[in-house]
Amino acid sequence: MREIEVKLKAKNLEEIEQKLKEKGCVLSEPISQHDVVYSLKGSRNEFQSAQEGDIVIRIRYLKDSAELTLKQQRSNESDNIECETEVADPKQVHHMLELLGWYPVVEVKKMRRKGKLGPYEICLDEVEKLGTFIELEKLTEEDIDAEEVREELFKELESLGLSRNDEETRGYDTQIYQLDHPVK
């Protein structure tokens, strides 16, 4: 599947949550997520100048489970082919990844509330080191026009009183990597 999302820096999650309730969107309880993001041979290119075709792998630790995700970038960091599965033993997966030449590069810790807004998944995120964000995403077929989907997502976000001027095009992993490793 192809995941296309729009991420906006959010000033007031409580206000956004109220507007979502008015639209009938029910959000989950807060979910703690701890992501460990890997790159091939410990490369940093994916976080400095991402390009179409770049791959990152993530182990996401949740309260009682873990997930393995592979993302291959398409037109930008918010447009990816995504494969995801639950893993029973994340330590073994970590070891396998290292044997294959994939090494941890960055960690992302956040509290997330998720919900459905029509055909979209919506996430309200409080990200350690970065602040608060709202993400709206749509899962599509791989051959879709990403710009058409992005426009659709922006219209939905604008109906909540949000502005596309607040868009953040970098993933949380890239933002944290660049924060921790500023270009000199």
Image (spheres, rainbow, N blue to C red):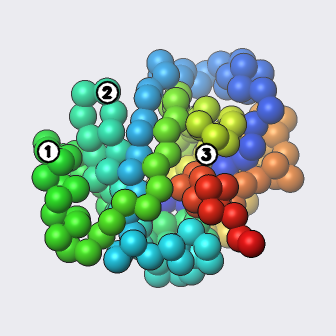
Classify mark 3: helix, strand or loop: strand
> Is 8 located above or below residue 101 in the figure?
above
Residue 151's tag is none
Residue 68 visible: yes
- Label 2 vs 1, first from the N-terminus: 2
| Among the 4 quarters of the image, the one containing residue 89 | top left
Give coordinates of residue 155: x percent, y percent. 76, 49
Q: Quadrant of the C terminus?
A: bottom right
Q: Is residue 54 left or right of residue 153?
A: left
| Structural distance between the alpha carbons of marks 3 and 1 | 30 Å
Q: Amino acid under label 1?
A: Asp
Q: Give the residue at mark 1.
A: 89
Mark-to-mark CA distance, 2 and 1: 14 Å
**Looking at numbered disc 3 in the image, what kind of residue is underneath it?**
Leu
Q: Residues within 10 Å of mark 2 (few under 14, many from 20)?
A: few
Q: Is residue 11 left or right of residue 4?
A: right
Identified by mark 2, the residue type is: Lys
Q: Residue at x 20, y 74 (%)?
A: 100
Residue located beneath label 3 in the image: 136
Of 20 and 84, the residue lying toward us:
84
User: Which residue: 42% across, 36% down?
Assistant: 33
Which quarter shows the N terminus? Answer: bottom left
In which quarter of the view is residue 132 placed? top right
Q: What residue would you read off at disc 2?
A: 63
Residue plotted at (62% across, 56% down): 180
